[in-house]
Image: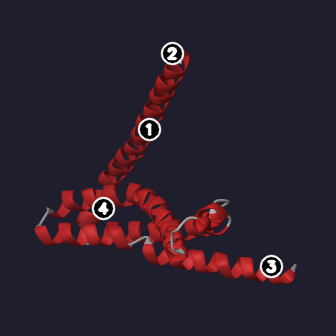
Amino acid sequence: MRFLSKVKNKLRISIIFSYILIISFYLLIMYGLYYLFSLLSPVFKDSECPQLIIAVVIAIVTIFTLIKSYMSANSFIFNTKDYERLFCLPIQPKIIVISKILSLYLYLLIFSMILIIPAYLTYVGITGLNFWFLIRFVIYLLLIPVVPMVLGTILKFALECLNATQL
């Protein structure tokens, strides 16, 4: 029994270390992007269009989210192995599907935040911060991945149906 608790403690330490390493990696990427956007900020400031940096990043995030949702729809929604076990539980099927879609949304939101937050910080460095900008930032941050996720998932579903009818 004592051996088992030592193994559990080592496993906990390993998991905590893994999370710390992953979070540090994401923060490092975000800092690198912020530094890159900061180097580009004089260009946007001189052109008197600092909102262009946000538009470019939103376009990149939209394309990235569309591709990522198309590639990840199978593993998150369509081809998961736990549907048989979940449908046996006293949970409505629509709640199970909604939870799968929300997990895909959170996955895409985390990856899109890596690009969006440094761009917004650079924009705030150029123009300054106000209350309405902060409100819009939070709303945009939450809504930017939605449309590409829906389009990518529908596209994946349509192509999977097309492949199933051809076989």
| Relative image position of residue 24 (x, y in whole percent) | 39, 38
Which residue in the structure is indicated by mark 1? 19
Image side of residue 86 versus residue 40, left or right:
right
Secondary structure found at label 3: helix
Mark in the foreground, 4 or 2: 2
| Relative image position of residue 159 (x, y in whole percent) | 71, 79
Mark in the foreground, 2 or 1: 2
Secondary structure found at label 4: helix
Which residue in the structure is indicated by mark 3? 164
Which residue in the structure is indicated by mark 4? 43
Which numbered dot is residue 2? 2
Mark 2 vs 1, N-terminal side:
2
Local crowd at mark 2 within 10 Å, few (<14), some, or many (≥20)?
few
Q: Can residue 119 be spotted in the picture?
A: yes
Label 4 and label 3: CA atoms lie apart by 50 Å
Q: Are marks 1 and 3 in contact (CB under 8 Å)?
A: no
